[in-house]
Image (cartoon, helix red, strand yellow):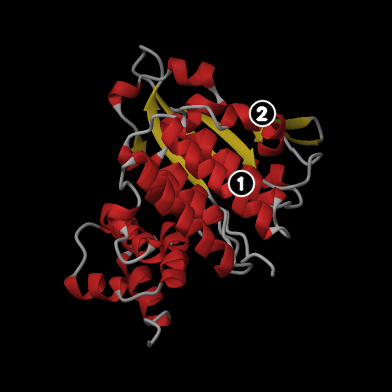
């Protein structure tokens, strides 16, 4: 039996929403030390969407986040543009350079850092520079890159780290490794899940990370049923109810409720208070529809986009 189709975009979009500071700490510790996190992080989702609208011709979805932070002790704003790319794209460096230039033009008085995170399975593909030169005019952009495959030799370290990003990176790598092996994926999923307790995470963090690893390490129903039993046994042994407390009628329902909560929170943050009718429509969506909405909502620029999406994706009749 084959595993369900892998989904990377949704989990990483959620990661960029909830774990920006741990992400910078994990991948760029020197930069993290220079940012004044006490001043907070401002997410510029709408500005990014206005500058770089969705590709309506190809339907390609970007996984990115534009944020504004304070750099060191000097009150200078920095824009950090993060791209997570999960499959090979030709001339990707040209695309990132175009994004970088557009952002700099929109915010001419701010420094811009473009960070590319490559989550694909091609070890040799890691573009980190764009150069355009003609007639003596030269434009060059060098940008830092992270290749998730480079962390394969560090899996043991990832599974003991107390940074939430280590959990997500490990789950991502195990997803790539087990595309045609559901039994091996089940073993890795149990392993990552159990490690959440051993790292001393808070219950809310365990619940959130559980949702992300379950989203990444998708299993066929027989293996998922066995994983469910493992979760219940683990909680009974540890005398905790971090996961079962949010899904008293089963893991799938708990995940459904969690996705509803996160999706509604993101939409409210983007557009303000939602109409009761809209909330009712969203709560009526099934799990797959909620996943699709979670991936689509960051491409929305106005409430009309949400209305149109809901009209085109009515709840599935039971």
Q: Residue at x 62, y 39 (%)?
A: 117
Q: Secondary structure at mark 2?
A: helix
Against 157, is 91 above or below?
Answer: below
Q: Position of residue 30 (x, y in %)?
A: 53, 16
Residue identifier under label 2: 154
Q: Is residue 29 left or right of residue 133?
A: left
Question: Which residue occupies the foreground of this view, 44 or 134?
Answer: 44
Q: Residue at x 40, y 48 (%)?
A: 45
Occupied quadrant, residue 239: top left
Q: Is residue 303 left or right of residue 116?
A: left
Number of numbered discs overlaid on the protein picture: 2
Against 166, is 10 above or below?
Answer: below
Occupied quadrant, residue 179: bottom right
Neighbour class for label 2 at 10 Å: few (<14), some, many (≥20)?
A: few
Numbered badge on residue 130: none
Outermost residue, front side:
237
Q: Mark 1 or mark 2: which is in front? A: 1
Q: Disc 1 or 2, which lies upstream in sequence?
A: 2
Numbered badge on residue 188: 1
Question: Which residue occupies the foreground of this view, 202 or 5?
Answer: 202
Q: Position of residue 177 (x, y in %)?
A: 71, 48
Q: Position of residue 228 (x, y in %)?
A: 46, 58
Q: Position of residue 53 (x, y in %)?
A: 50, 58
CA separation, marks 1 and 2? Answer: 15 Å
Q: Secondary structure at mark 1?
A: helix
Res 44 visible? no
Classify the position of the C terminus by image quarter.
bottom left
Res 250 visible? yes
Q: Residue at x 30, y 29 (%)?
A: 40
């Amino acid at each position: 039996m084959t595993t369900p189709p892998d989904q990377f975009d949704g989990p990483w979009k959620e990661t960029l929403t909830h774990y920006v500071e741990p992400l910078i700490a994990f991948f760029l510790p020197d930069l993290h030390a220079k940012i004044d996190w006490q001043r907070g992080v401002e997410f510029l989702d709408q500005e990014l969407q206005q500058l770089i609208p969705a590709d309506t011709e190809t339907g390609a979805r970007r996984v990115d986040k534009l944020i504004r932070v304070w750099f060191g002790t000097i009150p200078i704003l920095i824009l950090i543009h993060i791209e997570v790319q999960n499959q090979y794209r030709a001339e990707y460096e040209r695309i990132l350079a175009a994004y970088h230039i557009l952002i700099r033009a929109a915010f001419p008085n701010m420094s811009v850092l473009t960070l590319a995170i490559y989550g694909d399975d091609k070890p040799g593909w890691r573009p980190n520079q764009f150069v355009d030169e003609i007639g003596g005019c030269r434009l060059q952009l060098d940008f830092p890159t992270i290749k998730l495959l480079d962390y394969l030799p560090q899996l043991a370290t990832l599974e003991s780290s107390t940074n939430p990003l280590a959990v997500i990176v490990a789950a991502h790598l195990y997803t790539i490794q087990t595309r045609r092996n559901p039994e091996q994926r089940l073993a890795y999923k149990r392993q990552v899940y159990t490690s959440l307790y051993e790292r001393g995470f808070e219950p809310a963090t365990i619940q959130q990370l559980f949702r992300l690893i379950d989203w990444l390490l998708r299993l066929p129903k027989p293996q998922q049923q066995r994983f469910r039993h493992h979760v219940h046994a683990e909680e009974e042994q540890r005398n905790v109810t971090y996961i079962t407390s949010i899904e008293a009628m089963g893991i799938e329902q708990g995940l459904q409720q969690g996705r509803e909560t996160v999706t509604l929170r993101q939409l409210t943050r983007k557009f303000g208070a939602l109409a009761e009718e809209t909330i009712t429509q969203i709560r009526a969506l099934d799990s797959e529809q909620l996943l699709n909405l979670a991936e689509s909502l960051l491409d929305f620029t106005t409430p009309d986009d949400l209305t149109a999406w809901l009209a085109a994706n009515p709840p599935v009749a039971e």
